[in-house]
Amino acid sequence: MHGTRPLAWPHALALALVAFLLFAAAGEPPYRVLQRYQPGGDGGWDYVTVDGDGKRLFVSRSTRVQVLSLADGSLLGEIQDTPGVHGIALAPDLHKGFTSNGRDSSVTVFNLSTLAPIGRIDVQANRPDAILYEPVTHRVFTFNGGSANATAIDGATGKVVGHVALGGRPEFAVHDGRGHVFVNIEDKSELVRFDPKTLAVSARWSLAPGEEPSGLALDRAHRRLFSVCDNQKMIVMDADKGTVLATLPIGSGVDGAAYDPERGLAFASCGQGVLTVVREESPTKFEVVENDSTQRTARTVALDDATHKLYLPAASFGPAPAPTAETPRPRPPMVPGSFSVLVVGR
């Protein structure tokens, strides 16, 4: 996850104007904020995860995970004691969920039905960030920003079965359901592919001209990867050959990506307050079709494939306090009660 950075409001307004003109030309309604879920409580956030089967949304909140109803945003429960939680991975076939806890380098295992914690795993690495369940091997992978590797965990037993040396700081990851895992390497501006069974790296591809990738999405049918980068670019890559197929402009402050297979659309959630929408015209042609206004800080995203709605957490922040010798770059404080999850759709 990238940190909060200064964002350009005039640029966001210009993108919104371009979006309006694109909508008018295409005859399609734009994506817009339909609802705002307000679960309450203090704490920041990182990733969100949609549970399509259970019609729930899992939202990381610093020390706990809030579980909301997809239908109305009501708070269904919380998973407590997840210090520095970043991501949530769901394993419906095992009836379990897993959280990556960056502060104590652990994974919390919980019952997917009751949300009750049922175990804690030491990932044997530093600062796990993204987390992924790979259904072919039934393994859970944490991507450890402090160790430049990934930890492989047997989802059924909770035992650590090995590590994957990634050669850099990992960000988000996806799997293709065919025995491959793909992960962005932020500090190397690369994308790594590895085998979740053997834990061997099988490819390392440059994302140039993209720099500092974060969010990643996959079109499994056409084997296309969508990597969103800090220099305001989305890189579209062939998932088998590693060739760059397209470079597209996106908003600033990006941290999340999603792909809607039914509509053939890729999304970049940008913290400046813009959702960039890319249409896959064909397996070799891609274009930006929308830049929609969301909210400043709405930088991570999850997609509900069934409803085509997107969920983006956001909050308001006050002015940063004066710097001190102990804190030369203080972060602005979150406005109490301002946290919400934006429901975005057409």
Image (cartoon, rainbow, N blue to C red):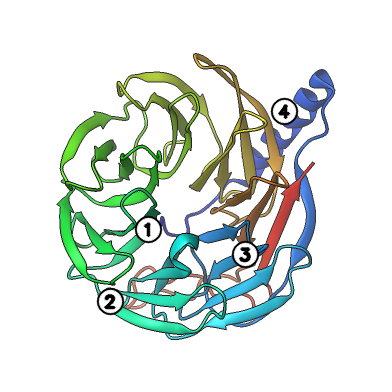
The answer to whether residue 189 is left or right of residue 262 is left
Q: Are marks 3 and 2 in contact (CB under 8 Å)?
A: no
Q: Which residue position is annotated with label 1? A: 130
Which of marks 4 and 2 precedes in the sequence?
4
Q: Is residue 253 visible?
A: no
Q: Quadrant of the N terminus?
A: bottom left
The answer to whether residue 157 is left or right of residue 25 is left
Q: CA distance from mark 1 to mark 3?
A: 17 Å
Which label is found at residue 121?
Answer: 2
Q: CA distance from mark 2 to mark 1?
A: 15 Å
Q: Amino acid at mark 3?
A: Leu
**Residue 202, above or below 88:** above
Is disc 3 placed on a helix, strand or loop? strand
Which of marks 1 and 4 precedes in the sequence?
4
Q: Are marks 2 and 1 in contact (CB under 8 Å)?
A: no
Q: CA distance from mark 3 to mark 2?
A: 23 Å
**Residue 175, above or below 280:** below
Of circles 1 and 3, the one toward us is 3
Q: Residues within 10 Å of mark 3 (few under 14, many from 20)?
A: many
Q: Which residue position is annotated with label 4? A: 18
Estimate the x, y position of residue 154 in percent, counting from the top left: 27, 64
Q: Residues within 10 Å of mark 1 (few under 14, many from 20)?
A: many
Which of marks 3 and 1 precedes in the sequence?
3
Which label is found at residue 57?
Answer: 3
**Residue 22, above or below 144:** above
Q: Amino acid at mark 1?
A: Ala
Is disc 4 placed on a helix, strand or loop? helix
